[in-house]
Amino acid sequence: MTLARAIRDVLTTADPRRKVKLARSAARRWRRGDLDHAFDVAMPDAPGRPREPELLPPSRMPRRGKGGSERGRIALLHALAHIEFTAIDLAFDMAGRFGCDFPRGFVDDWMSVGADEAMHFALLDRRLRSLGSRYGALPAHAGLWEAAESTAHDALARLAIVPMVLEARGLDVTPATVARVEAQGDIATARILQRIYTDEIRHVGLGTKWFEYRCAEDRIDPETSWQKLVKRYFRGQIKAPLNDSARASAGLTRSYYDSLVR
């Protein structure tokens, strides 16, 4: 089995539990040296998706509130589970689509990220089930894969947008969410979110590391290049307030994003 074929199996699998299992297995087999470092098959244009949840455009997504009630907490957990489910594919696609253009350590890093995202999804889905729900019970955001589609041709753009914008946003909002669910007495959910937050600092750091590596190879300024790529490929806005300390610990300093904050 080659690395690319193992990654493709993860990406094309629609069933959530099987995707988690394959993701963990692929990361473990790569770490053990059981997969050939070969890119002999192309990555799919889009990953497999289960019949549920129903995917809606952002304008049609119901407002979920701040999780004050059990119903609100289920909506919050479901939205986060969908983000982590999509993040499994984003990480494995990063390794499979662009790994041939980077040193082996690039694959090491993004396979480990994929395993983290699979674990995050499993934790959130288990928590949903403990509250009498499940992943797929509510509608979910249809636009999360768009960042992958728009940057499928450009590793530098993918690194700029997915870890350094989308995951970095998690660093901004998660601490307040953790504090809120703790105040509501939901310690189990708070612990899961804190674990995800800690891992996401590492993920953003890996994105920054490999972005700067490629910029050094291409002899271009990383901060100016990142700003140009964000303006071109990111449809939203980088909104204050930002978690500057967590971003800085991931190497994403204010000099990257200060001029783009709204």
Image (cartoon, helix red, strand yellow):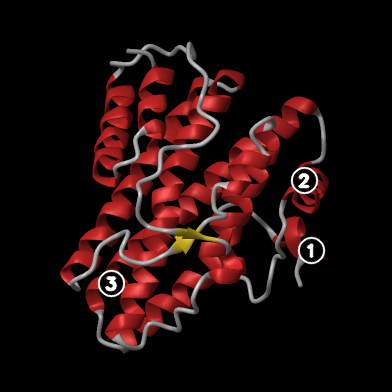
Residue that badge 1 annotates: 260
Quarter-of-image position of residue 238: bottom right
Q: Whole-Å distance between the Cαs marked 1 and 3? A: 33 Å
Residue that badge 3 annotates: 189
Measured along the vertical axis of the image, is residue 186 above or below residue 254? Answer: below
Q: Whole-Å distance between the Cαs marked 3 and 2? A: 35 Å
In contact (CB < 8 Å): disc 3 and disc 2: no
What amino acid type is highlighted by mark number 3?
Answer: Thr
Sequence-first tag of 1 and 3: 3
Residue pictured at 58% horizontal, 43% vertical = 207
What amino acid type is highlighted by mark number 1?
Answer: Leu
Taking depth in this image into account, of 133 and 108 the one nearest to the observer is 133
Residue that badge 2 annotates: 229
Q: Residues within 10 Å of mark 2 (few under 14, many from 20)?
A: some
Taking depth in this image into account, of 89 and 182 the one nearest to the observer is 89
Sequence-first tag of 2 and 1: 2
Secondary element at tag 1: helix
Whether residue 133 sits left or right of residue 182 in the image: it is left
What amino acid type is highlighted by mark number 2?
Answer: Leu
Residue pictured at 58% horizontal, 26% vertical = 98
Percent position (x, y) of residue 38?
45, 12
Residue pictured at 52% horizontal, 19% vertical = 42
Q: Residues within 10 Å of mark 3 (few under 14, many from 20)?
A: some
In contact (CB < 8 Å): disc 2 and disc 1: no
Measured along the vertical axis of the image, is residue 176 above or below residue 253? Answer: below
Q: Residues within 10 Å of mark 1 (few under 14, many from 20)?
A: few
